[in-house]
Image: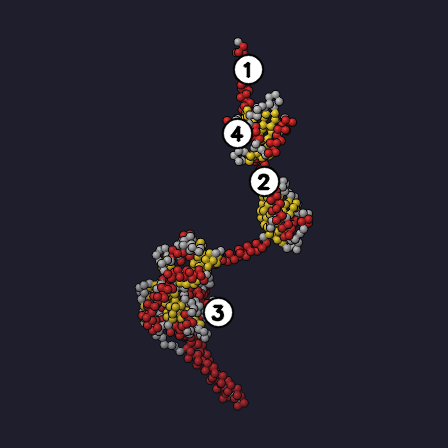
Amino acid sequence: MAPHRQLPIEQDQHEEIKQLRAIFNAVSDAIIVFDENFCVQHVNEAASQLFDKHYDELIAYQLKDFLMLFPYDVINDYYPTLVENQKFTYKGTMNLQNGIVKYVEFTCEQRSEASGSKICTFRDITAQKMVENERFLSQHMFMDVFNEAVDGIVIFDRAGQLIDVNPSFCDRLNFPKEYLLTKTLTELVEPAYHYKLKKLWRLLQKQGKASGELPIKLKNGDITFFEFTTTANIYSRYYMSIMRDVTEKRRMEQKLLRSEKNFRAIFEDAIEAILIWRHDGVIVNANAASSRTFELPLEELIGTNLQTFINKKDRHVWKLYYQFIEQEEIREELTFYMPNGEEKELEFTGKKGIIEGYHLTIFRNISERTKMEQELRNNEQKFRKIFDGSIDGLILWDGEQQIIDVNEPACEILEQTKEDICSQTMEMFLSSSNFDLVIEHKATIESKGEGEGDIQYKTASGKVKQIEFSTKKGILPGLYMTIIRDVTEKKQMEEQIRKSDTLQVVGQLAAGIAHEIRNPMTALKGFIQLLEDSMKEGHSLYFDIITSELQRIESIITEFLVLAKPQAIKFEEKSLAVIVQETIDLLNAQALLENVQFETDFDPSLSKVYCEPHQLKQVFINVIKNAIEAMKGGGVISIEVKHLNNRYMRVSIHDEGEGMPPERIRKLGEPFYTTKEKGTGLGLMVSYKIVEEHKGYIEVESELGVGTTFHVTLPVSQVQ
């Protein structure tokens, strides 16, 4: 029964040994137990890892095998110390058999003299030692950098008090170190920039680091900008800032920024294509105009090799390239081949290495000019006879309004030489008052292919001419031809006719006045003669003066009667629509200046009227001019010509002016009645008289705030 009672005790001992073994292996330090013969008795897993040996290998070692890993002086001290103190310790290097050097804390204790066993502990402190060495090295390196750095270095505490500054910072501020160490950051920075310091402290508290710029006042009073990078806790509770003087850098950056901004504006807005390319031909940058010139989207053009647009087999191309490399600049013309198959003649100017080592080339598309010049040469001979033989002035100009050629009549009209005219654009030789008309004329040509108009042109001698012109687009490929005609005399004649009509009416008024004056004048002359016969001779002088003055009055009356004689009027059949259109053309320039446009509606089946065209034109001029002047802010004048019935035709002219009240309408046509500040009232009076002589009549409709309509009704044929 006794063996059965001991079984639980043995099991407990076995479990205890098992737990001790687990603890032994779990210890992080390497532990080796030696017996009295200095042979390895027990080894934990940490020892196997430290010595990079398997358990079976270590169990065959002796104590001397481990001591040989230590320095020689350690081996000599081991045995005497162990015998004397029963314990030996060492802290230092240990050279393992695989060549690795380890830093260890070695402890060897002798358990008892009776057993003779020894327990040796190896603690690996390699990582700790390396950190200590690095820290030591870093401190020495930091001091070397601190003292030798070109940039300023400042160490300060949490209150901003300067703790240390390096020599570079002292030299830049021109203050001794002792003086600076009595200052705070706040005292060094100008008060206007203290907000930057507050931002610095916020970043340091939040992120532990900060960077930016600080303006610091030098000893001479100048302000210098320092670019700083600050880190926290380099020495416990201190901060360190590396301060770099960027004052000159800021000036250069601002200058470069302005230059770059100017270059970018020129680069982006340039009309010509601009390419920046590498030595191997790859395009690194291009402006928007380049995309149009080389027929590629900008993103595709950048990165494309310039050689893809040229004929690489052409010797002339390579000759130009080597010329560019040698002379570092070039200005030439060459054929370039676009991705869409189009060939373009490009004039280019290049500079080598002008932008950060890259080459810059400006391209100008001269394909149209070259093509145009060739086609002009081909058609010159057959066109020249017509061009030079025309009695009207002819001007050829291109899409950029540059004048290409003029004939002799044009030179005579403009009173300039051919060379002077061809050195200008269409706008340059016109007066500024015609610019709006020329722009509108150009737009009309582009939309309709042709256009016409008339302008006032002032010659170099100061003479003002009325020039009538018409332009045709595409008379030759890429060219416009303008025909000019001097209509100064024609305009003067029209003006004379208008004045003549006005004078006719005034003459009729004069005839009435002369008639009314002549009757009492006859009685006055008779009675004066009777009085002269009955008076004494002493008063003959007075009668002579009275008779002379009466004769003078009679002479003036005679002149009135001459003015009042009727003029011969020649009636003819004429299209009313043509007369109205000619009137519109005549007043179109004035309408444009007043921002007024015309809308016409002519019945295509209109009959002709029997009339005096110039007089009717004067009527329409008066009415339309009044309509233009009634619309001070511009607007639309609607003109309609139609049959009223079988016997009459009606011209209706409607404006968008302020309108008139009924009482004013009733007075229209009365002599000298006008609503205009400088008017005479004769215009409508003449118009009413002319229409009346043509057996017609004028009606007026008007509404305040809406506008006024004049209806001019005329017979289709002469009324007997």
Task: Give the camera-side residue of 111 and 475.
Answer: 111
Identity, as a three-letter code, of the amino acid under mark 1? Ile
Q: Determine crowd level at label 2: few under 14, some 14-19, many 20+ residues with C-alpha closer than 10 A.
A: few
Secondary structure type for disc 4:
helix
Sequence-wise, which precedes: disc 4 or disc 2? 4
Give residue 625's position: percent from left, percent from top: 43, 67
Task: Estimate the x, y position of residue 277 in percent, counting from the top left.
Answer: 44, 56
Q: Earlier in the sequence, mark 2 or mark 1?
A: 1
Check if mark 1's residue and mark 4's residue have beta carbons within 8 Å.
no
Q: Which residue is mark 2?
A: 134
Query: Which residue occupies 51% across, 85% down?
Result: 545
Determine crowd level at label 3: few under 14, some 14-19, many 20+ residues with C-alpha closer than 10 A. Answer: few
Q: Spatial distance from mark 3 to mark 1, Cα to Cα? A: 142 Å
Spatial CA span between label 2 and label 1? 55 Å
Between 335 and 521, the one lying in front of the other is 335
Q: Amino acid at mark 4?
A: Ser
- First along the sequence among labels 3 and 4: 4
Instruction: Tell me the residue at 40%/54% (across/down).
Output: 305
Helix, strand or loop at mark 1: helix
Residue holding disc 1: 9
Q: Estimate how packed mark 4 is, as few (under 14), some (14 to 19) or many (20 or more) residues with alpha carbons within 10 Å.
A: some
The quarter of the rendered structure image containing the C terminus is bottom left
Image: 176 above or below 513: above
The amino acid type found where label 3 is placed reads Lys
Q: Which residue is mark 3?
A: 678
Query: Can you tell which mark lies on residue 48?
Result: 4
Q: Is residue 559 visible?
A: yes
Where's residue 683, x and y in %? Answer: 43, 70
Q: Amino acid at mark 2?
A: Glu
Q: Residue furthest top?
A: 1
Q: Which mark sits nearer the N-terminus, 3 or 1?
A: 1
| Mark-to-mark CA distance, 3 and 4 | 123 Å
